[in-house]
Image: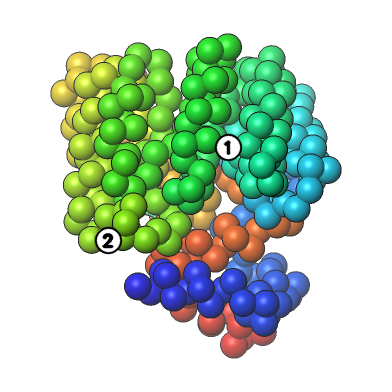
Amino acid sequence: MYGKLLLGATSRPAVQSMMTDSALNEKVVARFVAGETAPSAVAAVRRLTSQGLKVTLDYLGEDITDLRQADETVEAYRFLVEALAETRLADGAEISVKLSAVGQSLGPDGPRASTDRAHKLVEHAASLGVDVTFDMEDHTTVDHTLSTVTELRNEFPRVGCVLQSMLLRTEGDARDLAYAGSRVRIVKGAYAEPASVAHKKRAAVDAAYVRCVRSLVDGGAYPMIASHDTRLLDIAAFLFEASGRAQDAGEFQMLYGIRQDEQLKRAQDGHTMRVYVPFGTDWYGYFTRRLAERPANLAFFVRALISR
Ligand code: FAD
């Protein structure tokens, strides 16, 4: 309820203009976003990897309005991947891409245009040893995102995808994706979805999450446990161990700026912990989803607003 109300309020232009005030950006957004440029993202990668963490980088820009911007997104990722390779940070790195940032929602030809751009992007990243995972957006985009991943995996089997345990369809999708080598990030889901397609009770979302992880582990896939919910990480660690593949059975992922102590602790315990590092100027949608997830983040934001 809190999340739905907040996502509604932050889509209003007046709220948007107050929140994108530049003085506020520096203070608040910096907590969740690793700067506006590729060099600032690369600096964050250097810092995180020196602490034993892995990274996945997200160039923020889901709200595009024409194909020129979709091409700019592809270029921005090319530039980033080359910067990682030049600074010897490409090994083990991943990029996270939203199909809407490469054109998915631009009219009837948008889906095909986004798949073509996704192909270009993956081809270039793979040539420099960087993995690509496609983020999952709201429920209307799931079919196209999964079909893009299936198409790309014919040529690039390491392409990753995301499943959201809040969606009623997801346990079926997890069974379909539970095969050896299949890289699947599993999340609870960050979008306000109607009851016709999504679990509404937290306990149901969590129980579905565990069932999906179990399917993926049993099928020999590589689940990427993306959550700050330590109970879920503990259950997944138990399932990894029970599979007999221990640390190689999957990995943990958390967002930049959230539960950093826990990120370091899990890495020090010998698990692969990957940090999702967003960067770029178009941070508004990403930032408001983080506020919607947790009332304490809103309090942090309001304090910064008052103390300006
Ligand atoms: P929750 O039950 O929300 O949180 C558990 C605990 O973690 C909370 O009690 C709190 O202590 C802490 N916590 C959670 N969120 C925050 C926060 N914002 N700030 C501070 N503390 C917090 N969603 C998608 O829909 N599509 C994606 O492609 C996607 N990719 C993601 C990639 C990664 C690496 C991660 C970590 C999340 C991603 N998400 C994505 C977001 C996800 O769906 C959830 O909205 C988000 O992770 C919050 O759920 P949770 O699993 O952390 O559990």
Q: Quadrant of residue 171?
A: top left
**In the picture shown, does residue 274 fall above or below 168?**
above
Which of the two labelled residues, at mark 1 and mark 2, occupies the earlier sequence position?
Answer: 1
The x, y position of residue 115, in whole percent, is 64, 30
- Residue 238 shown left or right of residue 118 in the figure: left
The quadrant of the image that shows the N terminus is bottom left
Q: Quadrant of residue 84?
A: top right
Which residue type carries mark 1? Ser
Say if disc 1 is inside 8 Å of ligand 1.
yes
**Whether residue 3 can be seen here:** yes
User: Which residue shows up at 44% across the image and 48% down it?
Assistant: 139
The quadrant of the image that shows the C terminus is bottom right
The x, y position of residue 140, in whole percent, is 48, 48
**Whether residue 260 can be seen here:** no
User: Which residue shows up at 38% across the image and 74% down it?
Assistant: 2
Which residue type carries mark 2? Lys
* Inter-mark Cα distance, 1 to 2: 27 Å
Residue at which label 2 appears: 200
User: Which residue shows up at 37% across the image and 44% down it?
Assistant: 164
**In the picture shown, does residue 289 fall above or below 71?**
below
The x, y position of residue 48, in whole percent, is 56, 40
- In the image, 53 versus 120, the foreground residue is 120
Residue at which label 1 appears: 96
